[in-house]
Amino acid sequence: MGTGIEGDVVTYGAPHEGGEFHLGPVDWEETQWHNGCAPGTKYSSAARAAEGQLLAGLWQGIPDVTNYCDACIYVKTAKGKSAVLRVVTYGDTTPNSIDVSPQAFSILDTGEYPRSMTWQFAKCPDTGKMFYEFQTGASEWWTSFWLRNARSPIAKVEVQSPNHADWTPLERSGDGTLNDAKGFGKGAFSLRITTLDGKTMIDKFEWPAAGLAGQTLTSAGNTP
């Protein structure tokens, strides 16, 4: 998928047109709805701090919508307002519409109705390193994690580990987790991240002494 430049923002692919932005609300505390990209215990404090308050929920009709958990989108309204928002959920809206956090709404809204806009996937602001939040049930026999704070939208994540001599793709679940049903196996492992524009990076980890369950492992950096 090709990239483009919109002002100072790097964008990916064609705009999603014909939708509107609404006040969801989308928020970390889930005051109205659960965030689809979060565990039942909500987003962690580390993820909230890294990903900020400008949040969005996508229309669930987008193909493979769960692939875009924690990606960013660039939103531009018909009135000329714009913002880069972090995707933390998805749900049932009109086609190509989005829900937004109150902080995002205050930037985008000028009192118009309908609240027409277009959006594209975009590079996120630089807020530090990526990190991997492993599920509380993760182990060498079943391995599952969320990838948080990536700067670029992710096309795929692969693992190389004691159970996988060759790079093996991980599967996305409905909550945005990346999963290996057979598990990594116990020992050092590597994760290869490929972005929407085909760039790659690799993180290498030793097996944590306490195992993977509930661990947060920090990347060496972030996506290109």
Image (cartoon, helix red, strand yellow):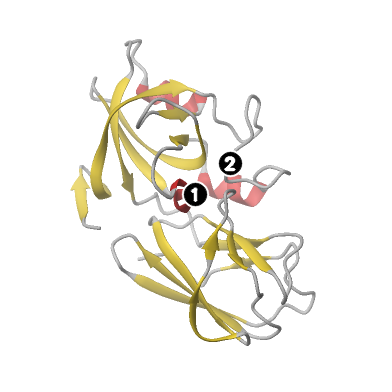
Instruction: Report the residue marked by disc 1.
Output: 66
Residue 30, above or below 197: above
The amino acid beneath tag 1 is Thr
Q: Are marks 1 and 2 in contact (CB under 8 Å)?
A: yes
Residue drawn at point x = 32 percent, y = 69 percent: 199
Nearest the viewer among 224 and 166 is 166
Nearest the viewer among 198 and 64 is 64
Which SS class for mark 2? loop
Residue 222 visible, this orientation: no
How far is mark 1 from mark 2, CA to CA? 8 Å
- Crowding around mark 2 (Cα neighbors within 10 Å: few <14, some 14 to 19, many 20+) is some
Residue 177, above or below 218: above
Where residue 24 appears, as percent x and y from the top left, is 51, 24
Instruction: Report the residue marked by disc 2.
Output: 36
Where residue 117 appears, as percent x and y from the top left, is 29, 26
Where does the C terminus fall, quadrant-wise?
bottom left
The amino acid beneath tag 2 is Gly
Where residue 101 appears, as percent x and y from the top left, is 50, 28
